[in-house]
Image: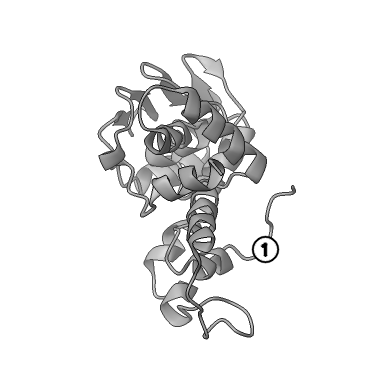
Amino acid sequence: MSRYTGPVCRLCRREGQKLYLKGDKCYTDKCPMSKRNYIPGQHGRSRKKLTEYGLQLREKQKVRRFYGIQESQMRKYFDMADKMHGITGENLLKLLELRMDNVVYRMGFASSRAEARQLVTHGHFTVNGKKVDVPSSILKVGDEIEVKSRSKNSPKFKELIENHRGSTVSWLDVSPEEMKGKIIAEPSREDIDIPVEEHLIVELYSK
């Protein structure tokens, strides 16, 4: 399945809530969700009550769109989470949080996960001193992420640091001035601020 390349604001409208896919624009009055808070399309205003399967599907799609992953990747992460100790739904969200692109976004070095994915792909970051350009790489506790020396003087990163909002999660230790951070703990469910009922995803994939 190819990656979605249409207007991402339609995805937010489809899920009925902000997914914060456009970075700073999502925090302004220009956000389409503020003007057209209904499903896109001809029959968007006439919402119907969802079935049990529909509710499960929407939760799964919501998570996919939050993290910008494809269905095949989602299924792979679920299989990994199912084999881990603990609660499968929480394990799934932890794996997604530890993706390289999400960690960069959580550190405040990108305005959105999509931008973080692009920056990682272009080779602007290192992990433990080695270049990592695969956004889907799963990191672990103790890994140190840093902007490459050559990239630190680029206008893009200077702008990001000037407008740095700081990390909002307790499992990351971030130093904006040095443009680096470290994973100091596994993300807990309380740290994952995505409004999703992960048990519905487990029920969907367990059928």
Q: Nearer the viewer, residue 39 or 116?
A: 39
Q: Is residue 148 visible?
A: no
Q: How far across and down, in percent of the image, does residue 132 sit? A: 58, 23
Q: Answer with left or right where residue 145 lies relative to residue 117.
A: left
Which residue is at the front of the view, 200 or 123?
200
Residue 81 is situated, as x and y percent measured from the top left of the image, at: 48, 29
Question: Which quadrant would the C terminus be assigned to in this image?
Answer: top right
Q: Residue at x 41, y 77 (%)?
A: 34
The residue lying toward the viewer, choosing from 192 and 147, is 192
Q: Left of 29 or right of it: where is 119?
A: right
Residue drawn at point x = 40 percent, y = 46 percent: 199
> In the depicted view, which residue is nearer to us: 95 or 54?
54
Q: Is residue 129 above or below residue 18?
A: above
Q: How is the image coloured?
A: one colour
Residue occupying the point 36% across, 32% down: 87
- Is residue 101 at all visible to an observer of this figure? yes
* Residue 6 percent coordinates (x, y): 67, 63
Instruction: Please name the residue that numbered disc 1 is placed on.
Output: 6
Identify the residue at horizontal 43%, vertical 40% (top origin). 109
The image shows residue 119, relative to residue 143, as above or below, that is below
Q: Position of residue 20 (x, y in %)?
A: 44, 58
Q: Secondary structure at mark 1?
A: loop
* Residue at the outermost right position: 2
Q: How many marks?
A: 1
Question: Neighbour class for label 1 at 10 Å: few (<14), some, many (≥20)?
Answer: few
Query: Three-letter amino acid code at disc 1?
Result: Gly
Considering only vertical position in the picture, is 103 above or below 159?
Answer: above
Farthest residue in the front direction?
207
